[in-house]
Image (tube, grey):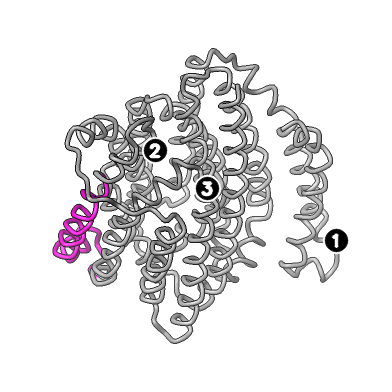
Amino acid sequence: MSASVGLGARARAGLQWTIINSVGEKALSFGTTMVLARLLDPEHFGLYALAFVVIDMFQIFKNLGLDAALVQRTDQVDEAADTVFLVLPLIGLALFGLLFVTAPWLAQALGNPEVARPLQALGFVLVLMSLGNVPAALIQRGMRFDLRTWSNLSGMIAYAVLAIVLARHGWGVWSLVVAYLTRWLVTMPLQWLLLGWRPRGRFHPALLREMLHFSKYVLGAWLVGLMMMNIDKIAIARWLGATQLGYYTLCLGLANIIMTQLSMHVYQVAFPAFAQAQHDVAMQRRGVVKLMKYLLLVGLPVMIVLLIAAEDVLRVAYGPRWVGAAPLLRVLALGGLLQTLRLGLEPILLGSGRAHTVFHLNLLQLGLLAIGAVAMAKAQQPLGVAWAVVVAAAIPLFLNARLVCRQLGLGWPEIFTPMRPILWSGASMACLMGACQWLRPWAGAWARQAPVWLGLLCVVGAAGYGVMVKDSVRQA
């Protein structure tokens, strides 16, 4: 009983630090993008996003899933950490060399030769990350998320300051490239310093083989997940061009404001928590209900704001030239919420050692997205690509929920009943905001000021949502 209580306390503390990290990182990232959107062209964002299609692909192999295997281990953790640390820097150097040599060919294959040089420069991050993977995994395993928060936010501050300064001096896409590398040059050494871990140079081949048996499925799931995150961008870049990719990328960033920050950081807490509670079914049952409740509690109102006030959000966030992308933002907002909930269910399967199941679900989502995104991009329909994202997230979400319910012996009512107050609160919020939008033409000249009107909508919506959801929050 005491072990369960201790794990629950560490998970709650980890979640608190994760929320601080998530809010801080998103505030810095979003604030920086607001400034950069007024200094850089959509093409610059498109080239940067296209470079990361390749960088993200290479990043999947930088640790072979061994960091997840290290988190999931319950014995010989120190020996495993030493073994993994001796392997990963060699992989990072090899990947950097391969990317540097093949960058011109990859840029040609993507239809944008000008992305080759930024891609070569960004490749150095593979070396930096390989040096920081083991400390990051040990921080996650020990749920020392305070250390990750301090190091990550310090790196983000460095990124924000440098990106804005360089953009103001006309560096274009290179302002983003140099700032990103600087972020990791700050974050990685700070993780080492705060954790205080030092490798002892020990190598254990038997442990490595054991971890690779688990990590191969994690690696496969990540690889498929990465393709899933980028296949739509590749399709748009190939058939619609870098400018359309710039619009799509920034809208996707707004739509995934929860998935890429809150849910990803919650995932970092939930995975080690469920791994350590993998033999305590009762604790897992309570955990999955609370986890889904928290994600819906935060994700639903964000989606509603983006659906109802898309034009004003884009005008305030990125400037008037981005307003035409509002229909794209609305569809992607729905996809972002579905993917947030889907991601919230993965730690239960992964923590129970069912990495192969996560892999197959990701493979299904990739197939659905690839078919839809390529078809819509060829038809010159960027909005159709966004709808492909929604469909590709909805079907695996349903299957994932069924698998989790079956594994933990949960019925659908046990999952959805706690969500009902949140859904009613969201409906109330949507009605109030929709009524305000309907009355806007009669509200006077001040209502044409996007920042003022958006602020009013958010206050009205938050009031309607908060009044009805307060009991649900208290119970959580």
The quadrant of the image that shows the C terminus is top right
Q: Is residue 94 magenta?
A: yes
Residue at the spot of label 1? 442
Residue 342 location in percent, x, y? Answer: 50, 34
Q: Earlier in the sequence, mark 2 or mark 1?
A: 2
Identify which amino acid the numbered label 2 is placed on.
Val
Does dot 1 land on a helix, a strand or a loop?
Answer: helix
Identify the residue under disc 3: 332
* Earlier sequence position, callout 3 versus callout 2: 2
As measured in the structure, the alpha-carbon distance from the residue carrying label 2 to the one carrying label 1 is: 57 Å
**Of marks 3 and 2, the one in the foreground:** 2
Q: Is residue 462 left or right of residue 208?
A: right
Q: Is residue 239 visible in the rendered structure shown here?
A: no
Q: Secondary structure at mark 2?
A: helix
| Type of the residue with mark 3 | Leu
What is the span of residues highlighted in magenta in the rendered image?
84-113
